[in-house]
Amino acid sequence: MSQKSYLFNVKGKVQRVGFRFHTAHTALKLGLTGYARNQEDGSVEVLVCGSEDKINQFLEWLQVGPQLARVDSIEKEETQWQELSDFKMY
């Protein structure tokens, strides 16, 4: 199965609600690597790397997010494959 990398920009109420923590937990549970990083505009940038089927499962979760979050929109862009060892929060 081919490995993919996607960059997501998640907009809504996604800062100060545990979004990055829950994103990292969900990604690791699915065996994905990458990072979640707060952006100055209030969005969260998420890089995720792994198999396409696991990324699709992750995206389903990302569209809802954790309980206190509100996801208004997600921009998705395929990026060059990156071999990372874990999932980090910045």
Image (tube, rainbow, N blue to C red):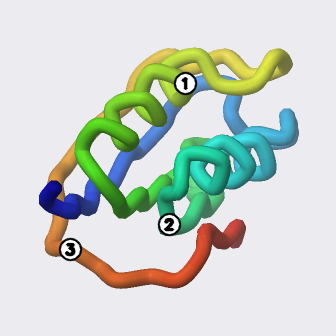
Question: Is 69 drawn above or below residue 45 in the view shown?
Answer: above
Distance from Cα at disc 2 to Cα at disc 1: 15 Å
Quadrant of the image containing the N terminus:
bottom left
Residue that mark 2 sits on: 33
Mark 2, secondary structure of its residue: strand
Residue that mark 3 sits on: 81
Please name whichever residue, 37 or 31, is drawn nearer the observer in this view of the structure: 31
Position in image of residue 75 (x %, y %) = 30, 36
Q: Going from the N terminus, do you reach mark 3 or mark 2 first?
A: 2
Please name the amino acid that badge 3 sits on: Trp
Dot 1 alpha-carbon crowd within 10 angstroms: few under 14, some 14 to 19, many 20 or more: some
The residue lying at 21 percent from left, 63 percent from top is: 3
**In terms of image quadrants, where is residue 9?**
top left
Mark 3, secondary structure of its residue: loop
Q: Which mark is residue 61?
A: 1
Quadrant of the image containing the C terminus:
bottom right
The residue lying at 53 percent from left, 83 percent from top is: 85
Question: Is 58 drawn above or below residue 90 in the view shown?
Answer: above
Q: Which mark is residue 16?
A: none
Mark 1, secondary structure of its residue: helix
Find out whether the residues at labels 2 and 1 contact each other: C-beta distance under 8 Å.
no
Distance from Cα at disc 3 to Cα at disc 2: 11 Å
The residue lying at 29 percent from left, 37 percent from top is: 53
